[in-house]
Amino acid sequence: MKKNIDIEILGHKYTIKSNEEEDFVYNIVDYLNRKIEEVLRTTTTVDTLNAIVVVALNITSDFFRIKNEGGELTQQIENKSRHLISLIDSYVDNEGNILSN
């Protein structure tokens, strides 16, 4: 069930509706604030909107990189699983009896 959660981003207060636990939302907001402050501190960008756009692009890039790595890992697991199944199949008959060499 969605609940209202009060958050603050760069000193601006917002109320959002979320199905997530409050601590989870607060961790996201803390992460976002840290990333925005980091961009503001380490670049010559003084415009807050530009800093937020840079952070959005960086977070999106991280998301897609992790998503792609997850897809590759899933493929590796599927390949190894198929290999193990074929090995098991080569030692077991249709009734589940272990075949002798």
Image: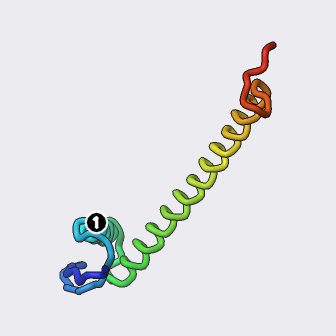
Q: Nearer the viewer, residue 76 or 61?
A: 76
Q: Residue at x 44, y 67 (%)?
A: 59
Q: Residues within 10 Å of mark 1 (few under 14, many from 20)?
A: few
Q: Nearer the viewer, residue 30 or 94?
A: 94
Amino acid type of the residue tagged 1 in the rendering = Phe
Provide the residue designation for mark 1: 24
Q: Residue at x 26, y 69 (%)?
A: 21
Quarter holding the C terminus is top right
View extreme (front): residue? 95
Q: Residue at x 67, y 45 (%)?
A: 78
Q: Is residue 15 visible?
A: yes
Residue 16 to residue 58: above or below: below
Quadrant in the rendering for residue 31: bottom left
Q: Nearer the viewer, residue 97 or 85?
A: 97
Residue 38 location (% of width, % of height): 30, 65
The reply, left or right, for residue 70 in relation to residue 83 is left
Dot 1: element: helix
Q: Nearer the viewer, residue 68 or 42?
A: 68
Q: Residue at x 67, y 40 (%)?
A: 81
The reply, left or right, for residue 69 in relation to residue 6 is right
